[in-house]
Amino acid sequence: MVIDDSRSSLSAVVDQLSRLEGCEPEGCLCPEEALGRCMLEQFDLVMVDYVMPKMNGLEVLAALRALDRYATVPIVVITSMNDRELKRQAIELGATDFLTKPFDWSELLARARNLLDLRQAQVELANRAARLALEVEAAVRDLSEREEEVIWRLARAVEYRDGTTGDHVSRVATISRLIAEGLGFDDVRSRMIYLATPLHDIGKIGISDSILNKPGRLTTEEFEQMRTHVTIGASILDGGSSELVRIAGLIARTHHERWDGTGYPARLAGDAIPIEGRIVAVADVFDALCSERPYKPSWSIERARAEIRSQSGRHFDPACVAAFEAQWPLIDHFLHAGEVASTV
């Protein structure tokens, strides 16, 4: 794009540039019209005269640099003045080069060719970077999917070890995600909690079958043995290199802590309990109440919900219970339809 209010000068520059192989120059007498064309068309080189009515060359330069698509496009300022202050201002506004009238046509063509070659290299580099970014994104997505698959298969193994199916962990994971969203967590953090939650009871693989599947209530000694599944799970997951495994370890260690400090294994209280553990505590207890176990019948959904509310500030973080209640329409829909509704 060549911008010059002098018809003869514009025609001469366009005619010279058309001699360059692969160059298709376009000229504009009006800078406002030229800016409009630049917004519609991606030009690879802009040459703009400084002295023009209404808008001078520096104003056109500033307007072009304000456009994302012209942030790196070579822009040449044409002037008949040898003004150092003008050149300084042009450089500060992002001018790539200068040409002085009257033109040395061989110099103009050489500079135009070099700048077009530079632009081509920029475009090729950007395209290569975009391809690499897509390849990296695909590789990361593949690794993430593999990590997720391993987690769900491990969670399923734990559930079978516990004498149940994988429905409990998937329900707890989904309800935990909904609570996290109710607390205002973004999609990435909420999904991380969703994916980490299925391993909250992985430590049960270290508990004997006689305790896991015992019909009726556990003795005090057996209950103490059952409690060790928390520290066993934490030891399995501790030291993980990924954020997902790190969060899974936090949840495994702290989802049986209580807001009032009467939980286990560390008797943490209040905000000393990681928020991930506080979230999963609500979801885990709620689903456990709704589920049949060898030692108890299942509760109704409303009775379990009332129990969660009644334990706010004692067993559970009040903020997590409030988020649970705020998300109840989605939770209720999920429990009855097996999916999370997109709207309430």
Image (tube, rainbow, N blue to C red):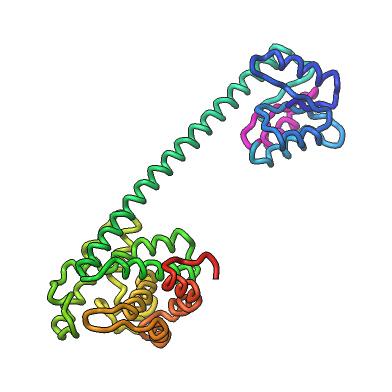
Quadrant location of residue 170? bottom left
Task: Name above or below for residue 190 compared with residue 328.
Answer: above
Residue 16 in the image, given as x and y percentages of width and height: 74, 14
55 or 330, which is in the foreground? Answer: 330
Q: Residue furthest bottom?
A: 310
- Residue displayed at 44% across by 81% down: 318
Task: Name above or below for residue 193 compared with residue 139.
Answer: below
As for residue 300 lying within the magenta part, the answer is no
98 or 37, which is in the foreground? Answer: 37
Looking at the image, residue 237 sits to the left or right of residue 171; the answer is left
Quarter holding the C terminus is: bottom right
Task: Name above or below for residue 165 compared with residue 47.
Answer: below
Residue 228 in the image, given as x and y percentages of width and height: 19, 74
Looking at the image, residue 37 sits to the left or right of residue 296; the answer is right
- Residue displayed at 48% across by 68% down: 181
- Residue displayed at 46% across by 66% down: 340
- Residue displayed at 81% across by 21% down: 10
Q: Is residue 313 visible?
A: no
Residue 169 in the image, given as x and y percentages of width and height: 32, 68
- Which region is colored magenta? 70-95
Quadrant location of residue 315? bottom left
Looking at the image, residue 220 sits to the left or right of residue 167; the answer is left
Quadrant location of residue 236? bottom left
As for residue 75 lying within the magenta part, the answer is yes
Q: Is residue 8 visible?
A: yes
Instruction: Count every numbered label the image shows and give the total.
Output: 0
Residue 171 in the image, given as x and y percentages of width and height: 36, 69
Quarter holding the N terminus is: top right
Q: Residue furthest front?
A: 337
